[in-house]
Image: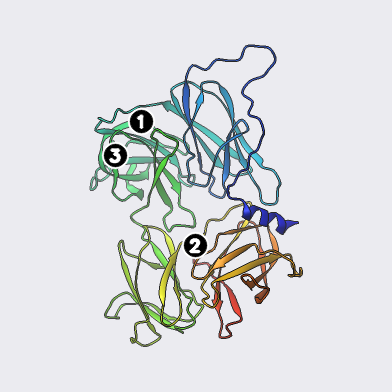
Amino acid sequence: MRLREVKQLMKQTALLPALAAAFILGACDGTSLPTATGKADIRAINAIKTSPEVGFLIEERVLGSIDFRQISSLNEYDDLDYNFNFDVFFLGDATATRIATQHIDIVADMDYILLLSGTLSNATITVWETAKRTFDGTETVFEARFAHISDSLGSIDYYFAAPGVAPVLGEEAGTLSFGDVLTSIDYTAGDFVLTVTTSGDPSDVLYQSDTSTFLAATQYLITTFDGGAITNAPIIGRAFSLGAGSATASATLPDINYPATVEFVNGSLAMGTVDIYKDVLLTSLIVDDLPYMGMSAEHDLVVGGNPVFYTPFDGTSPVLIESTINFSTGIRGRVVSYGPSDALSARIYLPDRRPVESQAKLQLYDAAINYEFINIYLLEPDEILEDQFPILTVTSGTAAATIPLLAGSYDLYMREFGTTVNLAGPIRLDVVLGDVVSAMIFDTIDPSVLELQFLPTNP
Protein backbone atom coordinates (compact mmCIF):
# COMPACT_ATOMS: atom_id res chain seq x y z
CA MET A 1 0.00 0.00 0.00
CA ARG A 2 1.28 3.42 -0.91
CA LEU A 3 0.97 5.10 2.51
CA ARG A 4 2.50 2.18 4.36
CA GLU A 5 5.58 2.59 2.18
CA VAL A 6 5.65 6.33 2.92
CA LYS A 7 5.47 5.68 6.64
CA GLN A 8 8.28 3.15 6.47
CA LEU A 9 10.45 5.69 4.70
CA MET A 10 9.74 8.34 7.35
CA LYS A 11 10.94 5.96 10.06
CA GLN A 12 14.31 5.42 8.45
CA THR A 13 17.15 7.22 10.22
CA ALA A 14 19.40 7.08 7.17
CA LEU A 15 18.79 7.03 3.47
CA LEU A 16 20.51 3.81 2.67
CA PRO A 17 20.38 0.49 4.50
CA ALA A 18 23.00 -2.15 3.88
CA LEU A 19 22.60 -3.06 0.26
CA ALA A 20 24.65 -6.25 0.11
CA ALA A 21 26.03 -8.90 2.43
CA ALA A 22 29.36 -9.21 0.66
CA PHE A 23 31.82 -6.79 -0.88
CA ILE A 24 33.66 -8.62 -3.66
CA LEU A 25 37.05 -7.21 -4.69
CA GLY A 26 38.36 -10.11 -6.74
CA ALA A 27 37.37 -13.42 -8.24
CA CYS A 28 38.21 -16.67 -6.53
CA ASP A 29 39.01 -18.63 -9.68
CA GLY A 30 42.50 -19.71 -8.82
CA THR A 31 44.24 -16.82 -10.59
CA SER A 32 46.51 -14.41 -8.76
CA LEU A 33 44.76 -11.48 -7.18
CA PRO A 34 46.15 -8.00 -7.96
CA THR A 35 48.41 -6.52 -5.31
CA ALA A 36 47.85 -2.99 -4.01
CA THR A 37 50.87 -0.69 -3.77
CA GLY A 38 49.19 2.36 -2.24
CA LYS A 39 45.95 4.21 -1.66
CA ALA A 40 43.97 7.05 -3.23
CA ASP A 41 41.30 9.45 -1.95
CA ILE A 42 37.70 9.15 -3.23
CA ARG A 43 34.80 11.59 -2.89
CA ALA A 44 31.60 12.40 -4.81
CA ILE A 45 29.46 15.51 -5.37
CA ASN A 46 25.74 15.51 -6.14
CA ALA A 47 24.85 18.18 -8.73
CA ILE A 48 21.39 16.84 -9.68
CA LYS A 49 19.29 19.70 -8.37
CA THR A 50 15.96 17.83 -8.35
CA SER A 51 17.27 14.63 -6.76
CA PRO A 52 16.54 13.11 -3.37
CA GLU A 53 19.57 11.94 -1.42
CA VAL A 54 21.77 9.73 -3.58
CA GLY A 55 23.72 6.75 -2.30
CA PHE A 56 27.42 6.61 -3.21
CA LEU A 57 28.89 3.10 -3.31
CA ILE A 58 32.14 1.34 -4.15
CA GLU A 59 30.97 -1.87 -5.79
CA GLU A 60 28.08 -2.77 -3.41
CA ARG A 61 29.49 -1.15 -0.28
CA VAL A 62 27.85 2.10 0.78
CA LEU A 63 30.26 5.01 1.20
CA GLY A 64 27.60 7.53 2.16
CA SER A 65 24.61 9.50 0.92
CA ILE A 66 24.74 12.97 -0.63
CA ASP A 67 22.05 15.56 -1.17
CA PHE A 68 22.15 18.27 -3.83
CA ARG A 69 25.19 20.58 -3.43
CA GLN A 70 26.82 18.17 -0.99
CA ILE A 71 30.13 16.33 -1.14
CA SER A 72 30.66 12.93 0.43
CA SER A 73 33.12 12.18 3.20
CA LEU A 74 36.66 11.21 2.28
CA ASN A 75 37.29 7.53 1.61
CA GLU A 76 40.64 5.88 0.95
CA TYR A 77 40.99 2.75 -1.20
CA ASP A 78 43.79 0.60 -2.60
CA ASP A 79 45.09 1.25 -6.11
CA LEU A 80 42.98 -1.47 -7.73
CA ASP A 81 40.06 -1.10 -10.13
CA TYR A 82 36.49 -0.67 -8.93
CA ASN A 83 33.00 0.21 -10.07
CA PHE A 84 31.65 3.26 -8.26
CA ASN A 85 27.86 3.35 -8.17
CA PHE A 86 25.12 5.86 -7.43
CA ASP A 87 21.78 4.53 -6.13
CA VAL A 88 18.46 6.17 -5.32
CA PHE A 89 15.59 4.87 -3.20
CA PHE A 90 12.50 5.94 -5.11
CA LEU A 91 9.52 6.39 -2.82
CA GLY A 92 7.39 3.26 -2.83
CA ASP A 93 10.18 0.93 -4.00
CA ALA A 94 11.53 -1.80 -1.76
CA THR A 95 15.03 -1.66 -3.24
CA ALA A 96 17.35 1.02 -4.56
CA THR A 97 17.62 1.89 -8.24
CA ARG A 98 21.06 2.27 -9.78
CA ILE A 99 21.20 5.50 -11.78
CA ALA A 100 24.90 5.61 -12.76
CA THR A 101 28.13 3.59 -12.62
CA GLN A 102 31.73 4.63 -13.21
CA HIS A 103 34.67 2.23 -13.52
CA ILE A 104 38.00 3.62 -12.28
CA ASP A 105 41.39 1.96 -12.30
CA ILE A 106 42.71 3.66 -9.18
CA VAL A 107 46.23 5.09 -9.18
CA ALA A 108 48.01 5.41 -5.85
CA ASP A 109 48.46 8.85 -4.28
CA MET A 110 45.77 10.44 -6.42
CA ASP A 111 42.67 12.34 -5.36
CA TYR A 112 39.43 11.46 -7.19
CA ILE A 113 36.17 13.40 -7.15
CA LEU A 114 33.15 12.00 -9.01
CA LEU A 115 30.66 14.66 -10.10
CA LEU A 116 27.11 13.34 -10.52
CA SER A 117 25.00 15.61 -12.74
CA GLY A 118 22.14 15.55 -15.23
CA THR A 119 18.81 14.04 -14.15
CA LEU A 120 17.78 10.91 -12.30
CA SER A 121 16.75 9.28 -15.58
CA ASN A 122 19.88 10.42 -17.43
CA ALA A 123 22.66 10.83 -14.89
CA THR A 124 26.22 11.66 -15.95
CA ILE A 125 29.46 11.09 -14.05
CA THR A 126 32.49 13.33 -14.55
CA VAL A 127 35.76 12.26 -12.91
CA TRP A 128 38.21 14.86 -11.62
CA GLU A 129 41.61 13.58 -10.58
CA THR A 130 44.71 15.26 -9.26
CA ALA A 131 47.76 14.27 -7.25
CA LYS A 132 47.29 14.13 -3.48
CA ARG A 133 49.02 16.88 -1.58
CA THR A 134 50.29 16.81 1.97
CA PHE A 135 50.99 19.99 3.92
CA ASP A 136 53.40 19.99 6.86
CA GLY A 137 51.64 22.92 8.53
CA THR A 138 54.39 25.49 8.02
CA GLU A 139 53.11 26.70 4.65
CA THR A 140 51.72 30.21 4.21
CA VAL A 141 49.74 29.27 1.11
CA PHE A 142 46.60 27.32 0.39
CA GLU A 143 45.70 25.37 -2.72
CA ALA A 144 42.56 26.18 -4.69
CA ARG A 145 40.85 24.30 -7.49
CA PHE A 146 37.91 25.97 -9.22
CA ALA A 147 35.03 23.96 -10.68
CA HIS A 148 31.94 24.89 -12.70
CA ILE A 149 28.79 23.06 -11.51
CA SER A 150 26.09 25.58 -12.59
CA ASP A 151 24.34 23.88 -15.50
CA SER A 152 22.29 27.01 -16.23
CA LEU A 153 25.48 28.87 -17.22
CA GLY A 154 27.62 28.47 -20.30
CA SER A 155 31.31 29.35 -20.50
CA ILE A 156 32.36 31.53 -17.57
CA ASP A 157 35.47 33.16 -16.11
CA TYR A 158 36.45 32.83 -12.45
CA TYR A 159 38.22 35.71 -10.73
CA PHE A 160 39.68 35.20 -7.27
CA ALA A 161 41.24 38.24 -5.65
CA ALA A 162 41.47 40.37 -2.53
CA PRO A 163 38.38 42.39 -1.54
CA GLY A 164 37.95 45.52 -3.63
CA VAL A 165 39.93 44.24 -6.62
CA ALA A 166 37.73 44.45 -9.72
CA PRO A 167 37.87 41.74 -12.41
CA VAL A 168 40.26 42.63 -15.24
CA LEU A 169 40.49 40.61 -18.43
CA GLY A 170 43.64 38.52 -18.38
CA GLU A 171 43.71 38.17 -14.59
CA GLU A 172 41.06 35.46 -14.35
CA ALA A 173 41.91 32.21 -12.61
CA GLY A 174 40.58 30.46 -15.68
CA THR A 175 37.71 29.89 -18.09
CA LEU A 176 35.38 26.96 -17.49
CA SER A 177 32.44 25.18 -19.06
CA PHE A 178 30.04 23.04 -17.05
CA GLY A 179 31.84 20.09 -15.47
CA ASP A 180 35.30 21.60 -15.84
CA VAL A 181 37.81 21.91 -13.01
CA LEU A 182 40.95 24.05 -13.19
CA THR A 183 44.46 22.96 -12.33
CA SER A 184 45.36 23.73 -8.72
CA ILE A 185 46.62 27.23 -7.94
CA ASP A 186 48.46 28.34 -4.77
CA TYR A 187 47.45 31.58 -3.04
CA THR A 188 48.81 33.29 0.05
CA ALA A 189 46.39 32.70 2.92
CA GLY A 190 43.98 35.54 3.66
CA ASP A 191 40.74 37.16 2.56
CA PHE A 192 39.40 36.63 -0.95
CA VAL A 193 36.33 37.34 -3.10
CA LEU A 194 35.16 34.96 -5.83
CA THR A 195 33.66 36.69 -8.88
CA VAL A 196 32.12 34.89 -11.86
CA THR A 197 31.61 36.67 -15.18
CA THR A 198 30.60 35.80 -18.70
CA SER A 199 33.63 34.43 -20.50
CA GLY A 200 35.71 37.27 -21.93
CA ASP A 201 33.57 40.04 -20.38
CA PRO A 202 34.66 41.01 -16.83
CA SER A 203 31.98 43.71 -16.73
CA ASP A 204 29.16 41.13 -16.97
CA VAL A 205 29.20 39.86 -13.38
CA LEU A 206 27.06 36.76 -12.87
CA TYR A 207 28.00 36.12 -9.25
CA GLN A 208 30.08 37.76 -6.51
CA SER A 209 30.78 36.29 -3.09
CA ASP A 210 31.24 38.13 0.14
CA THR A 211 34.73 38.27 1.62
CA SER A 212 35.84 34.87 2.93
CA THR A 213 38.98 33.84 4.78
CA PHE A 214 41.01 30.98 3.35
CA LEU A 215 43.47 29.22 5.65
CA ALA A 216 47.07 28.27 4.96
CA ALA A 217 48.10 24.64 4.44
CA THR A 218 44.61 23.72 3.20
CA GLN A 219 43.22 22.35 -0.06
CA TYR A 220 39.98 23.91 -1.31
CA LEU A 221 37.59 23.00 -4.09
CA ILE A 222 35.67 26.19 -4.91
CA THR A 223 32.52 25.69 -6.96
CA THR A 224 29.33 27.32 -8.17
CA PHE A 225 25.90 25.69 -8.16
CA ASP A 226 22.52 26.84 -9.42
CA GLY A 227 20.58 28.60 -6.67
CA GLY A 228 17.15 27.01 -6.94
CA ALA A 229 14.05 27.73 -4.86
CA ILE A 230 15.79 28.16 -1.49
CA THR A 231 17.51 31.40 -2.49
CA ASN A 232 16.83 34.59 -4.41
CA ALA A 233 20.22 34.34 -6.10
CA PRO A 234 20.58 32.39 -9.36
CA ILE A 235 24.03 31.12 -8.32
CA ILE A 236 25.45 29.87 -5.00
CA GLY A 237 29.15 29.35 -4.32
CA ARG A 238 30.56 26.57 -2.15
CA ALA A 239 34.06 26.08 -0.77
CA PHE A 240 34.94 22.50 0.17
CA SER A 241 37.96 22.01 2.40
CA LEU A 242 39.57 18.76 1.27
CA GLY A 243 41.85 18.04 4.20
CA ALA A 244 42.88 14.70 5.63
CA GLY A 245 40.39 12.75 7.70
CA SER A 246 36.94 11.46 6.89
CA ALA A 247 35.08 14.76 7.30
CA THR A 248 34.96 17.24 4.42
CA ALA A 249 34.26 20.76 5.67
CA SER A 250 32.23 23.06 3.47
CA ALA A 251 31.14 26.69 3.51
CA THR A 252 28.41 28.40 1.51
CA LEU A 253 29.50 31.53 -0.36
CA PRO A 254 26.24 33.42 -1.06
CA ASP A 255 26.00 36.14 -3.69
CA ILE A 256 26.30 39.50 -1.90
CA ASN A 257 24.14 41.19 -4.54
CA TYR A 258 21.04 39.29 -3.42
CA PRO A 259 19.71 40.09 0.05
CA ALA A 260 17.89 37.66 2.27
CA THR A 261 14.11 37.87 2.19
CA VAL A 262 11.42 37.06 4.71
CA GLU A 263 7.72 36.19 4.70
CA PHE A 264 5.70 37.05 7.78
CA VAL A 265 2.92 34.71 8.94
CA ASN A 266 0.48 35.80 11.64
CA GLY A 267 0.20 32.64 13.70
CA SER A 268 -1.15 34.00 16.99
CA LEU A 269 -4.89 34.06 17.53
CA ALA A 270 -4.32 36.39 20.50
CA MET A 271 -2.95 39.22 18.34
CA GLY A 272 -5.68 39.63 15.75
CA THR A 273 -4.78 41.72 12.69
CA VAL A 274 -1.41 43.47 12.96
CA ASP A 275 0.95 45.94 11.32
CA ILE A 276 4.71 45.32 11.30
CA TYR A 277 7.27 48.13 11.43
CA LYS A 278 11.06 48.09 11.10
CA ASP A 279 11.91 51.05 13.34
CA VAL A 280 11.35 51.80 17.01
CA LEU A 281 9.58 55.07 16.15
CA LEU A 282 7.00 53.07 14.18
CA THR A 283 7.32 55.21 11.05
CA SER A 284 8.61 52.61 8.54
CA LEU A 285 5.83 50.12 7.82
CA ILE A 286 6.89 46.74 6.44
CA VAL A 287 3.59 44.85 6.46
CA ASP A 288 0.17 46.45 6.61
CA ASP A 289 -3.02 44.76 7.76
CA LEU A 290 -1.77 41.17 8.27
CA PRO A 291 -4.74 39.10 9.49
CA TYR A 292 -4.60 36.04 11.67
CA MET A 293 -3.50 33.07 9.51
CA GLY A 294 -2.32 35.48 6.80
CA MET A 295 1.09 35.48 5.10
CA SER A 296 2.82 38.52 3.63
CA ALA A 297 4.77 38.91 0.43
CA GLU A 298 8.55 38.52 0.62
CA HIS A 299 10.50 41.50 1.98
CA ASP A 300 14.21 42.22 1.61
CA LEU A 301 16.42 42.20 4.70
CA VAL A 302 19.62 44.12 5.31
CA VAL A 303 22.82 42.35 6.33
CA GLY A 304 22.95 42.10 10.12
CA GLY A 305 20.09 42.53 12.55
CA ASN A 306 16.65 43.56 11.29
CA PRO A 307 14.40 44.92 14.08
CA VAL A 308 10.66 44.29 13.76
CA PHE A 309 7.80 45.72 15.82
CA TYR A 310 4.28 44.29 15.74
CA THR A 311 1.38 46.55 16.64
CA PRO A 312 -2.40 46.28 16.40
CA PHE A 313 -3.70 47.13 12.93
CA ASP A 314 -3.88 50.92 12.39
CA GLY A 315 -2.49 51.51 15.87
CA THR A 316 0.93 52.08 17.37
CA SER A 317 0.20 50.92 20.90
CA PRO A 318 0.86 48.57 22.45
CA VAL A 319 3.88 47.00 20.76
CA LEU A 320 2.87 43.34 20.76
CA ILE A 321 6.20 41.84 19.66
CA GLU A 322 9.63 43.44 19.49
CA SER A 323 12.27 41.25 17.92
CA THR A 324 15.33 41.14 15.66
CA ILE A 325 15.50 38.78 12.70
CA ASN A 326 18.29 37.84 10.37
CA PHE A 327 19.01 35.29 7.66
CA SER A 328 22.11 34.60 5.63
CA THR A 329 22.49 36.50 2.37
CA GLY A 330 20.14 35.28 -0.35
CA ILE A 331 18.11 32.97 1.91
CA ARG A 332 14.31 32.97 1.69
CA GLY A 333 13.21 32.73 5.32
CA ARG A 334 9.91 32.86 7.16
CA VAL A 335 8.88 34.43 10.49
CA VAL A 336 5.84 33.23 12.45
CA SER A 337 4.23 35.28 15.21
CA TYR A 338 3.42 32.74 17.89
CA GLY A 339 2.08 32.36 21.40
CA PRO A 340 -0.55 33.55 23.88
CA SER A 341 -1.07 37.25 24.64
CA ASP A 342 1.35 37.21 27.60
CA ALA A 343 4.15 35.36 25.78
CA LEU A 344 4.16 36.47 22.16
CA SER A 345 7.27 35.86 20.07
CA ALA A 346 8.56 35.93 16.47
CA ARG A 347 9.92 32.54 15.45
CA ILE A 348 12.07 32.05 12.36
CA TYR A 349 12.50 28.98 10.21
CA LEU A 350 13.67 28.00 6.74
CA PRO A 351 10.88 26.35 4.75
CA ASP A 352 11.78 23.36 2.61
CA ARG A 353 11.28 24.79 -0.88
CA ARG A 354 13.43 22.52 -3.08
CA PRO A 355 11.42 20.33 -5.46
CA VAL A 356 12.39 16.69 -5.97
CA GLU A 357 11.43 15.16 -9.29
CA SER A 358 10.66 11.69 -7.91
CA GLN A 359 8.26 12.71 -5.11
CA ALA A 360 6.09 15.44 -3.67
CA LYS A 361 6.80 17.07 -0.29
CA LEU A 362 4.64 18.25 2.60
CA GLN A 363 6.10 20.40 5.37
CA LEU A 364 3.99 21.39 8.37
CA TYR A 365 4.55 24.17 10.88
CA ASP A 366 2.60 23.98 14.14
CA ALA A 367 1.57 27.50 15.20
CA ALA A 368 -1.20 26.24 17.51
CA ILE A 369 -0.68 26.65 21.27
CA ASN A 370 -3.58 24.68 22.73
CA TYR A 371 -1.79 21.33 22.27
CA GLU A 372 1.90 20.77 22.85
CA PHE A 373 1.98 17.72 20.56
CA ILE A 374 -0.30 16.75 17.68
CA ASN A 375 -0.38 13.46 15.78
CA ILE A 376 -0.64 13.76 12.00
CA TYR A 377 -2.34 11.04 9.96
CA LEU A 378 -2.26 10.70 6.16
CA LEU A 379 -4.68 8.18 4.69
CA GLU A 380 -5.92 7.06 1.33
CA PRO A 381 -9.01 9.05 0.29
CA ASP A 382 -12.05 8.07 2.38
CA GLU A 383 -10.04 5.49 4.33
CA ILE A 384 -11.26 4.89 7.89
CA LEU A 385 -9.12 6.63 10.53
CA GLU A 386 -9.60 4.13 13.32
CA ASP A 387 -6.65 1.81 14.11
CA GLN A 388 -4.29 3.83 11.89
CA PHE A 389 -0.86 4.99 12.98
CA PRO A 390 0.29 8.64 12.76
CA ILE A 391 2.84 9.48 10.09
CA LEU A 392 4.54 11.94 12.45
CA THR A 393 4.05 14.06 15.57
CA VAL A 394 4.38 17.85 15.41
CA THR A 395 5.43 20.09 18.29
CA SER A 396 3.89 23.47 19.06
CA GLY A 397 5.95 26.38 17.76
CA THR A 398 8.20 24.35 15.46
CA ALA A 399 8.50 23.12 11.88
CA ALA A 400 8.11 19.38 11.39
CA ALA A 401 10.26 17.13 9.24
CA THR A 402 9.30 17.10 5.58
CA ILE A 403 6.97 14.25 4.58
CA PRO A 404 7.77 12.67 1.18
CA LEU A 405 4.71 11.68 -0.84
CA LEU A 406 3.84 9.81 -3.99
CA ALA A 407 1.61 11.59 -6.49
CA GLY A 408 -2.08 11.28 -5.68
CA SER A 409 -4.75 12.25 -3.16
CA TYR A 410 -4.64 11.95 0.62
CA ASP A 411 -6.84 12.69 3.62
CA LEU A 412 -5.06 14.46 6.47
CA TYR A 413 -6.26 14.23 10.07
CA MET A 414 -4.97 15.73 13.32
CA ARG A 415 -5.41 14.18 16.74
CA GLU A 416 -4.32 15.16 20.19
CA PHE A 417 -1.15 13.24 21.06
CA GLY A 418 -1.84 10.07 23.06
CA THR A 419 -5.59 10.17 22.49
CA THR A 420 -8.18 9.44 19.83
CA VAL A 421 -9.60 12.97 20.07
CA ASN A 422 -9.99 14.28 16.54
CA LEU A 423 -8.89 17.94 16.18
CA ALA A 424 -9.24 18.38 12.40
CA GLY A 425 -9.92 16.39 9.26
CA PRO A 426 -10.40 14.93 6.85
CA ILE A 427 -8.52 17.58 4.84
CA ARG A 428 -8.01 16.60 1.21
CA LEU A 429 -4.49 16.98 -0.20
CA ASP A 430 -3.78 16.47 -3.91
CA VAL A 431 -0.17 16.41 -5.10
CA VAL A 432 1.87 15.65 -8.20
CA LEU A 433 5.54 14.75 -8.39
CA GLY A 434 7.71 17.79 -7.79
CA ASP A 435 5.16 19.60 -5.61
CA VAL A 436 6.40 21.28 -2.42
CA VAL A 437 3.43 21.96 -0.15
CA SER A 438 3.85 24.19 2.89
CA ALA A 439 1.05 24.15 5.46
CA MET A 440 0.52 25.60 8.93
CA ILE A 441 -1.60 24.47 11.87
CA PHE A 442 -3.59 27.20 13.63
CA ASP A 443 -5.82 27.48 16.69
CA THR A 444 -9.48 28.44 16.31
CA ILE A 445 -11.85 30.16 18.71
CA ASP A 446 -12.98 26.69 19.75
CA PRO A 447 -9.97 25.25 21.63
CA SER A 448 -10.99 21.72 20.67
CA VAL A 449 -10.74 22.45 16.94
CA LEU A 450 -7.63 23.17 14.84
CA GLU A 451 -7.36 24.56 11.33
CA LEU A 452 -4.84 23.69 8.62
CA GLN A 453 -4.01 26.34 6.03
CA PHE A 454 -1.97 25.68 2.89
CA LEU A 455 0.38 28.63 2.50
CA PRO A 456 0.68 30.39 -0.86
CA THR A 457 3.89 30.26 -2.87
CA ASN A 458 5.53 33.64 -3.33
CA PRO A 459 7.17 34.13 -6.72
Bin the neighbour count of mark 1 within 10 Å (Cα to Cα): few under 14, some 14-19, many 20 and up: some
Q: Earlier in the sequence, mark 3 or mark 1?
A: 1
Q: Is residue 305 above or below residue 220?
A: below
Q: Which residue does the numbered mark 3 point to in the structure image?
A: 215
Q: CA distance from mark 2 to mark 1?
A: 37 Å
Residue 243 placement (x, y as % from top left): 38, 34
Q: Where is mark 1, residue-wise?
A: 184
Q: Is residue 454 above or below residue 41?
A: below
Residues marked 3 and 1 touching at CB (< 8 Å): no
Query: What amino acid does circle 2 point to?
Result: Pro
Marks 2/1 in contact by CB < 8 Å: the verdict is no
For mark 2, give the secondary structure. Answer: loop
The residue located at (24%, 43%) in the rendering is 162
Picture residue at 68% right of the left edge, 17% below the top: 28
Q: Quadrant of residue 364?
A: bottom right
> What numbered label is drawn on residue 46?
none
Query: Where 259 falls versus 247 (above or below)?
Result: below
Q: Is residue 379 visible to the viewer in this orientation of the structure?
A: yes
Compute the Cα span from label 3 to label 1. 15 Å
The residue beneath circle 2 is: 351
